[in-house]
Amino acid sequence: MRLASEKTNTMKQSFAKGMVIFTVILMDLLTGMEFDLFVPSFPELQSHFGLSPFWVEASLSVNFIGYCLGLFFVGGLGDRYGRKPIILIGLVIFIIGSVLCLWAPSYSFLLGGRFLQGIGVSAPAILSFLIIADEYPLKQQQVLMAMMNGVMNASIAGAPVLGSYITLYFQWQGNFRALLLLGMAVFVMTVLFIPTQKRPEHKETLSLRGYIPLFKSQPLTLLLVHFIFVSVPYWIFVGMSPLLYMEDLRVSLSHFGYYQGALALVFALGSLLFGLIIARFNQKKMLTVSFQITIIGFICIALVAYLDIPNAFLITLSMIPFIIGQIIPSNLLFPISLNLMPKAKGRVTAVIQVGRLILVSISLQLAGYFYQGSFRNIGILIALFILGGIITLFYVIKNREIMEISGE
């Protein structure tokens, strides 16, 4: 009887842990699809509301602004009150924003809904992985990070394809309807399966002064800058490719999603493979290999931009070495950044996301402003940020404290 009872308890614990990880994956999926699922709707949205490319991109920028504003509060609130209640509040705001987008009588209402979606999705975006980081040591965090990134990006790879077909058959409103249903599903799963975290005895300040100590750590600051630089190129590509591919390169709506989804699929498969082999290799050597691959990616994109090649397949192909080069650093270095200041995990993640979104918003507006119907200006902007990522990764590898935390 005792052995049976212990076996039953073990099975219940395994099921509970599995559902927590599954719910976290759903949160990350919602975060990614909130952007990717909607992007194939751009040409139809432009036609429906009579918009210029600048105003089409504004639907992303407004979303990013809401996201950034939410991040300033979510990180500190998550460290102060725990992850679950803040995530639930964020999901409620996201659901309200989705409803507003779905039944928007004018483009200004849709922008308002996108703003609320950005605020709401910031909570699961920031706090989802911290649920894992609170429970597991660094090595397991890195393995789980790689596996979760693999599953999440495999799903995100399908989002543009799914978004293209939803737009094809259900118009641009169909994508907002899908986001609304996914947000509601994540809310229910969070209520049922995410445990309530014990509140810390020491209450951290919720003011901006609470973020100042993060920048006093040179290794952490270096990692933050690196994460911000390397995230921008992909989002510039995602944000501008609908107009470039469908409007100027004449890629059909039904085929567009395959081009955009290919990059997320490459990252997904690479992350899954990396999660299986992470324990077998020296982390510093793996980062050095990534550094070299990223240089190749920079050369490929710069060359395609310089030659201004009007071919969707070759443009997508030029992005793949850069994507491959980011698989190892993203899965190794993010958990390390959280462990540099364990009591400020929420704020560390918030700074990374805020920096990313501010730079992405500015870059997308610049790309939209200078867009001339070809890849040249987009590619130049992408290449500049990749160069920044190469420089910062070089100094990350040379930083002794970061390498010591990684166990090297």
Image (cartoon, rainbow, N blue to C red):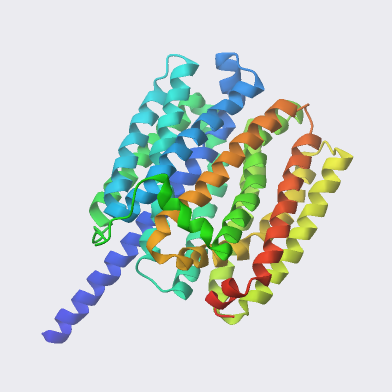
Q: Nearer the viewer, residue 378 or 401?
A: 401
Residue 113 percent coordinates (x, y): 42, 26
Q: Nearer the viewer, residue 23 or 71?
A: 71
Residue 374 percent coordinates (x, y): 79, 32
Q: Residue at x 31, y 66 (%)?
A: 17
Q: Residue at x 52, y 39 (%)?
A: 35
Could you tell me if residue 93 is visible in this image?
A: yes
Vertical comparison of 73 with 48: above or below: below
Residue 147 percent coordinates (x, y): 49, 65
Residue 114 percent coordinates (x, y): 46, 29
Residue 55 is left or right of residue 131, and the answer is right
Q: Residue at x 32, y 60 (%)?
A: 20
Vertical comparison of 260 with 275: above or below: above
Could you tell me if residue 254 is visible in this image?
A: no
Q: Nearer the viewer, residue 183 or 284?
A: 284
Vertical comparison of 347 with 379: above or below: below
Residue 149 is left or right of residue 379, and the answer is left
